[in-house]
Image (cartoon, rainbow, N blue to C red):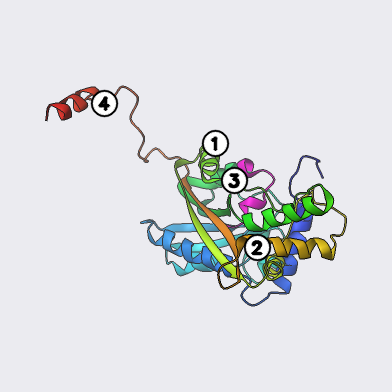
Amino acid sequence: MPPDQLIDTSLLTRRKRRAVERAADGADFLMRRAGEDLADRLAAVSRHFKQGAALFCATSHARDVMLASGKVDKVIRIETDSALLGHDEGEIAAPGFVPLEAGSIDLAVSLLSLQDENDIPGMLVQIRRALRPDGLFLGVMAGAGTLAELRESLLAAEAELTGGASPRVLPFADVREAGALLQRAGFALPVTDVETVTARYSTMFDLMVDLRAMGANNPMNGRTRKPSTRDFFARAAQIYAERFSDPDGRIRATFSFIWMSGWAPAATQQKPLRPGSAEVSLARILKEDDQD
């Protein structure tokens, strides 16, 4: 594995497979929320799509929403492991690789997986190439602020007990960086926005159980290989409760959803005017407003 890769993709795939095979009731609440948001966003698009693709979503939520919208005729799923596909039509691909021919789909959807890519710009470029002209990409990834409370509590406990710190929660992009990534990948009319989801738990340990059930516990290559002690986790849970609990004693966990949309360039799309092509100058408009 290249030393510059942030994510251990083999470990991540094994954890996602285990999460599917040992599905825990309610642990998919973030994916269900993302699916509901996807349904709303598709409803606002006045287009019909012949061929869609759900890319590395780990569950069938994206596919089900796309077909239920009535706006997508067919959907193929792309996953890194056959266990993630279940009985759905799809293909198995290596992490970071989109096995679709150029210009072969009209709609690409990615739910809560891009944050786990070692090369997000490269993945977005592949998605754009797979889209036909004027094809649409809709995606959501975990963004800056996600699990900020857990990150702070773990770092504080480790620094207090050992005098150092190791990476335990992924670094996440912010909304401006996401918009820049869409532009860099060559998408037209890129749009990004943020939605914050706050979950509440009795203790930090209950949050960690859910993360494990999602296959979302620490996948970083730089994670410590030393077993963490009970004292460490007990202190982290204490710090979490001290700093991030509500009046009723339950703790908060923040999940930041960065939604992205972009279109494969097409000659029929609206384009910004060339600089200097305006027929009325801004100075003239301001002057007239002052006179009024």
Which structural element holds mark 4? loop
Residue 262 percent coordinates (x, y):
47, 46
Residue 211 percent coordinates (x, y):
68, 65
Q: Which mark is residue 242?
A: 2
* Amino acid under disc 1: Arg
Of callouts 4 and 2, the N-terminal one: 2
Q: Residues within 10 Å of mark 4 (few under 14, many from 20)?
A: few
Reading the image, the residue beneath label 1 is: 184
- Of all residues, the one furthest to the bottom in this rendering is 25
* Amino acid under disc 2: Glu
Task: Work out how far the residue at label 1 is from the one at label 3, CA to CA, in angstroms.
Answer: 15 Å
Which quarter of the figure is the N terminus placed in?
A: top right
- Of all residues, the one furthest to the right in this rendering is 226
Does residue 177 lie above or below 71 as drawn?
Answer: above
Residue 139 percent coordinates (x, y):
53, 53
The segment highlighted magenta reads: 110-122
Reading the image, the residue beneath label 3 is: 173
Q: Is residue 118 magenta?
A: yes
- 226 relative position to 34: left or right: right
Which quarter of the figure is the C terminus placed in?
A: top left
- 32 relative position to 204: left or right: left
Look at 66% across and 65% down and name the residue there.
Answer: 241
Look at 25% across and 26% down and name the residue there.
Answer: 282
Residue 190, image quadrant: top left
Of callouts 1 and 3, the N-terminal one: 3
Q: Marks 1 and 2: which is nearer the front?
A: 2
Q: Mark 4–mark 1 contact, CB under 8 Å?
A: no
Reading the image, the residue beneath label 4 is: 278
Look at 43% across and 59% down and name the residue there.
Answer: 41
Q: Marks 4 and 3: which is nearer the front?
A: 3
